[in-house]
Amino acid sequence: MDTILFPLMWIISYIMYGIHTALTAIGMQAGAGPAWVLSIVGLTIIIRILIIPLFNKQTRASRASQELAPEIRKIQKKYKGRTDQVSQQRQQEEMMALYRDHGTSPFSACLPALIQMPIFFSLFRLLYAVLPISTVSYQRPSIGPINQAVAQEIGESTVFGAPLVSSISTANSFSLPTNVIVVAVVLIALMMATLFFSQKQIMTKNLPEDSQDPDNPAYKMQKYMLYGMPLIYLFSGSVFQVGVLVYWLTGNIWNIGQQTWLITKNPAPGSPAYKARQERLRAKRIAKGLPPEEEESPTEVSVGQREQPLGKKRSKKAAAKGVEPAADVVNGAAADIAEEEYEIRGLDGLTDAERAQKRYERRMAERQRSKTKKNKKQQAKQRQQNQKKRNF
């Protein structure tokens, strides 16, 4: 495993060493001490900052998955009561095709955790290698800047008396085994509580009501993570060192802060947090003396084709019919008249403006024909696929 993870272990060692150097430069104690504990906290923060784009992508994918809930329910209703293998396979294929067409996945919420797992195990192996590096008899080579002297500093650094490299399973190897067990158990309990809180925060505040269907795969995944992940901490926490537990706990606290900001500033539409945000915005508008709801500006330009100014002849016809010309026509009537007097027509009897209009209409007709042809091809392809599924 060390051979595979060595590049990540090397990078992590340099990040921790750099943070420790910066902390000692601003006045913290050099050598063994809290600076090495804070270097693990700093490592967590740097990793979390680097994966913020991934967090944003996860948020977009999760919301896309929530929007698909009605379509998923239709597919489930279609195959309700069909327990044969063929029907189950078709149901899965249709659901995966739906996710694929919308660029999302029911497992999108697990993506940041999966990305962090190699980093987590690299830190675990790095702390595991600290004691062999610090002992001359082992003769283990250095990892990045962590040589024998630096490894001794890390090995002697503690969290409330428990060394960073200690764990519940290796507590008897240290001078204060009871202290190691107590600190590790407290850290594991805090990890479980913070993870449960962060998952519960998503499900109760930032999940639309129509997505809270027990048959929705995304909702099922959230529920499994709510109760399953804390249990993983309970059974695996005894193996990991105190330093790894500090990394994990710091990451959970970062998640809570990041999710709180997201739920407050950019909640999912239709969720309880979104409704609460709308109420806050409405209250702010009322406090400023504005209408509760934001109104459209009367001067807003409508999206559509702009009304073209009328020329001299068309203006006369409009006046004869009793139609009042637009304001811009009245203001630019003199210019229209002067322009029309000097209009030059080509051999086809058209002016430049009329010729440009015809080209525009021809292009629009070609686009419409192309679009109609493309739709017919897609419909034919869909009919072929449906025929294959029926013949399956």
Image (cartoon, helix red, strand yellow):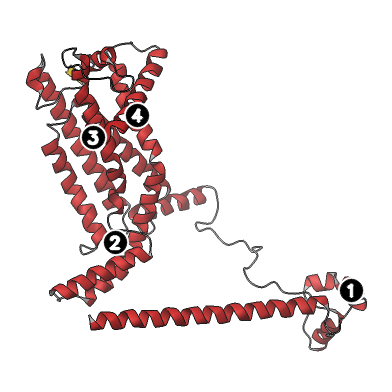
Earlier residue among tags 4 and 1: 4
Amino acid bearing label 4: Ile
Residues marked 3 and 4 touching at CB (< 8 Å): no
Earlier residue among tags 4 and 2: 4
Amino acid bearing label 2: Ser
Query: Which quadrant would the N terminus be assigned to in this image?
Result: top left
Residue 353 to residue 1: above or below: below
Amino acid bearing label 3: Phe
Local secondary structure at mark 2:
helix
Name the side, left or right, on which 319 lies relative to 239: right
Q: Which labelled disc corresponds to residue 11?
A: 4
Residue carrying label 2: 211
Mark in the foreground, 4 or 2: 4
Mark in the foreground, 4 or 1: 4
Mark in the foreground, 2 or 1: 1
Q: Residue at x 63, y 71 (%)?
A: 304
Q: Which labelled disc corresponds to residue 339?
A: 1
Where is residue 30 shown, x and y percent of the image? 33, 11
Residue that extends furthest to the bottom in the rendered view of this protein: 321
Q: CA distance from mark 3 to mark 4?
A: 13 Å
Earlier residue among tags 3 and 4: 4
